[in-house]
């Protein structure tokens, strides 16, 4: 019996030493392989967190982001927003867009810590510069459009960010931008802007945003049947281009394209760290 215990202990120590000898990228890869398909097995989760910490301590940004997510959501550890901010910040400073988005969202929402709009804008703008992002640009649009966010309202900036989010697949950004065009908040008035707004609302409906149905019902009268027919063709073309873009990125996950966008969940972050530079023409 003592021999068996000794052998088990020896093997455990040898395995731990071998894992510590792996480079941080390999430690991260092994950790994430334990978490595929929402794996919640306690032993696998514990092993994954151990490997993530080794990799994060070695300076590997995706592992630091993953640890931040674990602390933010209480995955395998007690929730701790301060540890989450610490790990996210380390990764965000290395240019990790998921960490930047996560930081900006936390500072903007203020649910787990005091709101800080300066920090929110800084990190969200960094995340929005990455073509894999659609959520940070949406949140920036709401920040500049909604005067409840305690910033100077700037419709031009709001339209810019909603347009970027819309082009990257968010049907709620299409709704916001479409309504801005209809109201004249996006830089002009006239039938051409109403037609653009109608195209965006139609596309939003095609991509699952049911909020726009009532508005669509009154739009055909405003632009006429011929204009509505043209808009429908344009909407289908826009939908197909957006689907072509989104299918080459990471995802989908719940909250990726929503009225309150969320960053990639832990088990999908490795996929979403892959480089993708596809843009809508």
Image (cartoon, rainbow, N blue to C red):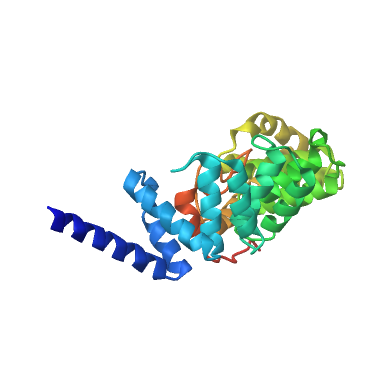
Q: Is residue 208 above or below residue 57?
A: above
Front residue of 17 and 174: 17
Q: Is residue 55 above or below residue 104?
A: below
The quarter of the image holding the C terminus is bottom right
Q: In which quarter of the image is residue 92?
A: bottom right
Which residue is at the far left?
Answer: 1
Left or right: where 202 falls relative to 8: right
Front residue of 255 and 114: 114
**Image spot of residue 273 (x, y percent):** 53, 61
Q: Residue at x 70, y 50 (%)?
A: 137
Q: In which quarter of the image is residue 229?
A: top right
Left or right: where 251 falls relative to 199: left
**Image spot of residue 211 (x, y percent):** 63, 32
Q: Which residue is drawn at 77% across and 52% down?
A: 160
Q: Tell me if residue 237 can be seen.
A: no
**Image spot of residue 233 (x, y percent):** 63, 50
Q: Tell me if residue 2 can be seen.
A: yes
């Amino acid at each position: 019996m003592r021999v068996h215990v000794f052998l088990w202990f020896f093997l455990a120590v040898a395995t731990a030493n071998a894992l510590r000898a792996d480079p941080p990228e390999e430690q991260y890869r092994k950790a994430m392989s334990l978490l595929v398909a929402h794996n919640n097995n306690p032993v696998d989760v514990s092993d994954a967190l151990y490997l993530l910490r080794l990799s994060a301590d070695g300076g590997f940004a995706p592992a630091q982001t993953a640890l931040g997510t674990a602390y933010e959501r209480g995955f395998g550890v007690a929730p701790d927003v301060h540890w989450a901010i610490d790990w996210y910040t380390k990764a965000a400073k290395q240019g990790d867009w998921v960490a930047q988005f996560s930081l900006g969202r936390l500072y903007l929402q203020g649910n787990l810590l005091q709101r800080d709009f300066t920090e929110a804008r800084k990190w969200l703008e960094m995340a929005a510069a990455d073509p894999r992002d659609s959520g940070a640009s949406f949140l920036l649009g709401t920040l500049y459009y909604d005067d409840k966010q305690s910033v100077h309202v700037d419709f031009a900036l709001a339209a810019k960010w909603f347009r970027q989010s819309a082009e990257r697949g968010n049907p709620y950004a299409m709704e916001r931008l479409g309504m801005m065009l209809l109201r004249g908040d996006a830089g002009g008035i006239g039938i051409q802007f109403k037609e653009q707004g109608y195209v965006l609302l139609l596309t939003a409906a095609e991509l699952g945003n049911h909020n726009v149905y009532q508005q669509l019902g009154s739009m055909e009268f405003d632009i006429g049947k011929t204009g509505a027919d043209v808009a429908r063709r344009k909407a289908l073309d826009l939908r197909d281009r957006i689907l072509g873009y989104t299918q080459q990125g990471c995802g989908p996950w719940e909250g990726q394209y929503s009225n309150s966008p969320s960053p990639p969940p832990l088990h999908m972050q490795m996929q979403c760290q892959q480089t993708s530079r596809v843009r809508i023409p």
